[in-house]
Amino acid sequence: MENSKKEQITIGPLAKDGEKLIASLEKGNMVAILSQAEIMYTLLRGDYLCYIHPIGSEEGRAKRFPRDTQHRAVVKNLAELADQLFEVEFDKHMDVMAVMVTAESAIVEFLDSIGQLPAEDFDFMTGETVKQ
């Protein structure tokens, strides 16, 4: 029973507030930042780690930012740019990629249930629609 609990994640909405985003990261959580049809999964593991993934795609990219005042401000500002934020709590020994896959599944299911599933691919970093 104890082991199965460690293999679960908890996901829920997070207010679009930069201080709350930073506080969640500092607690060791992942924050999923939804912008159009992309999700940026952000973690604090020494540095700020950002995994950017178009919803439903097998492709993605990663960014690493030093944990300093300048990049803290950049990460904090992501809350203002996001459509929605999701806080993801998980056991720190779990595989991060598996956590992201599970979180994305839950986010897609949620967006579909409220009729908000994005119709087009949108590049989080450039702000442009990606042609299919």
Image: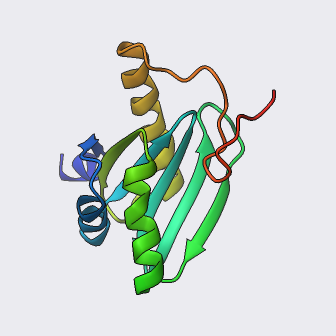
Residue at 62% from the left image edge and 30% from the top image edge: 56
Tag count in the figure?
A: 0
Question: Could you tell me which quadrant the C terminus lies in?
Answer: top right
Residue 88 higher or lower than 83, as above or below = below
Residue at 28% from the left image edge and 72% from the top image edge: 26
Q: Position of residue 45 (x, y in %)?
A: 43, 75
Which image quadrant for residue 22?
Answer: bottom left
Which image quadrant for residue 18?
Answer: bottom left
Q: Position of residue 128 (x, y in %)?
A: 70, 40
Residue at 46% from the left image edge and 41% from the top image edge: 34
State the residue in front, 89 or 51.
51
Residue 43 higher or lower than 123, as above or below = below
Q: Position of residue 27 (x, y in %)?
A: 24, 68
State the residue in front, 102 or 25.
25
Q: Position of residue 17 (x, y in %)?
A: 27, 55
State the residue in front, 69 or 5.
69
* Furthest-left residue in this view: 1
Which image quadrant for residue 37?
Answer: top right
Residue at 18% from the left image edge and 45% from the top image edge: 1
**Is residue 123 rendered to the left or right of residue 86?**
right
Q: What colour scheme does the image use?
A: rainbow
* Furthest-right residue in this view: 132
* Furthest-bottom residue in this view: 68
**Is residue 65 rendered to the left or right of residue 74?**
right
